[in-house]
DNA sequence: TATTGTTATACTCTATAACTATA
DNA sequence: TATAGTTATAGAGTATAACAATA
C-alpha cells in the first residue's frame, strides 16, 4: 500500500495506488444500494450464463411467468406489477411475440386492451426455462438456511413494497 | 376472480383474467432472484429520481467513489471490482471524462495503463452527490433496525462473494 | 378527459470481437 | 503470450414525448 495524501486537484506520484494494489470500497461499504446492486449483478450474470441457450432475460422470464399465471392480462397490468414503463413493456412483448412465445388478442371487454397469452411454444419454452432457473436459483439459495432465506426475502419485499419511491417521485406528467 | 381452466393452447373466454383483476405473482413468489430484482429496481428508480439533476447513474457514482478512494487505479481494476466488462468500463469512463468529472493520465509504472483521477469538478460533483444519496439511502434504511440492516447487507454480500458465478461460467475465451 | 396501445427517439448498460501498444 | 486500452457493433432495458383509438 501507498500512503495517500489526497487533496482535491493535487496528486503527486506518491498519492496514487500502485498496479496490484487491491481496490478499497471505502465509503461504498456502508451503502445499502451498492450491496444490493452488486448482488443483483451477480444474480443477473449467473442467470444470463444459465439461460444463454434459451436466450430469455430475467424480465422476459418474469413476464412469461406472469402471463402464464394471469392469461389475458394486458401490457399495462404487467408493467404496473413489475414497476415498468408502458413503452418498455411494449418493446419487451414485441420481442416475445417476434419469437412466437406470446400472442396478442384484442380484448372482448375493452377495445383499448390486448389480451396477452402464451403460445404453445411459449409454454414449452417456459417449462424448459423453469428447470434451468431452478438450478440457477439453487446455486444461491443453498448459501442460506430456510429461515435465513425467509428473512432475506421479507427484507427485499420491504424495499420494493415501501412507499419510498412514491414519496420521492414528482408524480410525473 | 375468474376460474382458470388453463390447458396449453386452449383458452376460452372464461379462462382469462378480467380487466381489474389483480395480477398474481404465482410461481415467482418463491424465486429469490425475482425479489432481488424487484428490490433493485425500486432502489434504482428512487436513485434516478433523486439524482436527476446531477445525472449520475448508480454505476457512475460507484466508479467515482472508487476513484476517489483509489486514485490512480486503472479501468481494469475498477471493472474487476464491480464485475464489469473492460469495454463497458471504457464507455462509462468516457462519459465521465466527457463531463470533466474524471481524468486519464498515462501510468508511469505501466505503459499499457491509464491512471484514473477525479478532476476538481468531479470532486465537487461527488460531494454534492453524496448528500443527495444519503437522503435516498435513508428512505430505505429507515425501514430496518440497525441489526436488520447488518444482517441484510451480510446476506447480499454472501450472494456476490459466492463462487456461484464462477462455478457456472464457462470461463470465457 | 383519461386510458391503452403504439411509434419514435435517445441514453445507458451489457457483452463480444478485433485491433494496437506494451509487458 | 498475456495484458490494458481502444473501437466497433449489437441487443436489452429504461424513459419521454406524441399520436390514435377507445372508454
Image (cartoon, coloured by chain):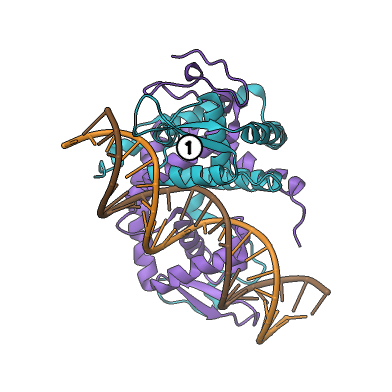
Chain colours: A cyan, B purple, C orange, D brown
The reply, left or right, for residue A41 in relation to residue C4 is: right
Identify the residue position indicated by label 1 in the image. Answer: B39
Q: Is residue A38 above or below residue A124?
A: below
In percent of width and height, residue A41 lies at 58, 48
In percent of width and height, residue A60 lies at 55, 41
Q: Is residue A170 shown to the viewer in this render? A: yes
Where's the C terminus of chain A, which quadrant? top left
> Which residue lies at the image location 48% right of the left edge and 56% below the top edge?
B59
Which quarter of the figure has residue A40? top right
Q: Is residue A103 above or below residue B99?
A: above
> Which residue lies at the image location 65% right of the left edge and 35% below the top edge?
A121
The reply, left or right, for residue B171 in relation to residue B8 is: right
Q: Is residue A27 above or below residue B102?
A: above
Q: Chain of mark 1?
A: B
Which quarter of the figure has residue A77? top left
Count the marks: 1
Crowding near pointer 1: few (<14 within 10 Å), some, many (20+)?
many
In percent of width and height, residue B154 lies at 58, 37
Amino acid at each position: 500500500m501507498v500512503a495517500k495524501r489526497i487533496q482535491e486537484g493535487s496528486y503527486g506520484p506518491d498519492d496514487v495506488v500502485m498496479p496490484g494494489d487491491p481496490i478499497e470500497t471505502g465509503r461504498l461499504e456502508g451503502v445499502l444500494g451498492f450491496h444490493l446492486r452488486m448482488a443483483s449483478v451477480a444474480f443477473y450474470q449467473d442467470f444470463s450464463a444459465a439461460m444463454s441457450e434459451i436466450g430469455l432475460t430475467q424480465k422476459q422470464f418474469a413476464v412469461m411467468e406472469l402471463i402464464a399465471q394471469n392469461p389475458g392480462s394486458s401490457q399495462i397490468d404487467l408493467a404496473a406489477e413489475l414497476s415498468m414503463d408502458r413503452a418498455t413493456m411494449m418493446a419487451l412483448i414485441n420481442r416475445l411475440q417476434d419469437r412466437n412465445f406470446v400472442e396478442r388478442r384484442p380484448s372482448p371487454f375493452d377495445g383499448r386492451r390486448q389480451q396477452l397469452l402464451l403460445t404453445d411454444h411459449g409454454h414449452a419454452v417456459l417449462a424448459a426455462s423453469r428447470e434451468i432457473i431452478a438450478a440457477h436459483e439453487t446455486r444461491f439459495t443453498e448459501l442460506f438456511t430456510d429461515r435465513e432465506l425467509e428473512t432475506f426475502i421479507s427484507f427485499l419485499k420491504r424495499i420494493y413494497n415501501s412507499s419510498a419511491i412514491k414519496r420521492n417521485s414528482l408524480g410525473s406528467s
